[in-house]
Image (cartoon, grey):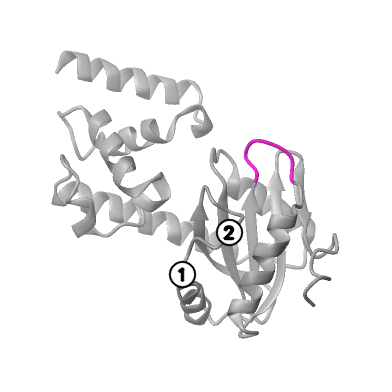
Amino acid sequence: MVENSGHRERMRQRFRNNTDLSNFTEQEVLEMLLFNVIPRADTRETAHDLLNKFGNLHTVLSADIDSLCQVKGVGIKCAEHLVFLGQVFRRAEKESLITVQADDFESLSRYLTNFFKGDTTERLCAFSINKSGKLTACTVLSVGITNQIAFDIEDLKKFLHQNSAEMLLLAHNCPDGSADLTEEDILLTRKIRNLLEDEVYLLDHVIVGADGMISMRSMGGFRAFE
């Protein structure tokens, strides 16, 4: 118990010294999220088991209560806490979207650079856009695999319908380097566009790297299929 208490205090002190979460691993972030709902036990093992089951922090915070409770050490109170946090994050994210205009490249670049900040793995995301050209909602399509369709296109269609999307923006990050347009990116974008069957206009696919953001449309990547 004393050793566990000391570990928690060291983790909290690290955060006080530098509140940038990019200095923490995904497991360490999840450990700290669990401190208040698992007051005595070592949360390291629970965080490790959660990530083993769900794959990443985003998926943990998107899971339902029943699925979370299947993990050893996660009780109903802990599961409710994680689900609540996930909903809070999604609400805050949605509120921050309403000021972002999709056709304002500088504003969009600032938003997405901050959106992907601290990510250590690639994420492919879809953003719905309303009639006014503003971003209204976001969903993560895949994590770790952004050059192939590793998701159900029907889930994307449902997301777009639920948010009354007029247009769709795709975005993925390159956490380990510069933003580069590849042939695989173009092929993936074409596949998604074809699978959507013109239900929603695909505005762009942007790529965010350490050196900024690039637009596939502006670079001519859409010419092959439009």
**Number of numbered callouts drawn:** 2
Where in the figure is residue 5, as x and y percent of width and height? 22, 19
Q: How busy is the neighbourhood of tag 1: few (under 14 within 10 Å), some, or many (20 plus)?
A: few
Where in the figure is residue 217, as x and y percent of width and height? 80, 65
Left or right: 58 in relation to 128: left
Q: Visible in this render: residue 168?
A: no
Q: Main secondary structure of the magenta part?
A: loop
Residue at x-position 16% and y-position 49% = 77
Helix, strand, or loop for circle 1?
loop
Left or right: 12 in relation to 155: left
Where in the figure is residue 46, as x and y percent of width and height? 23, 36
Where in the figure is residue 104, as x and y percent of width and height? 77, 63
Q: Is residue 199 above or below residue 188?
A: below
Would you identify the image quadrant in which residue 186 lies? bottom right
Tag of residue 152: 1
Residue at x-position 43% and y-position 26% = 15
Left or right: 60 in relation to 179: left
Tag of residue 126: none
Badge 2 amino acid = Gln
Badge 1 amino acid = Asp
Helix, strand, or loop for circle 2?
loop
User: For mark 2, what is the residue?
Assistant: 148
Magenta segment? 174-179
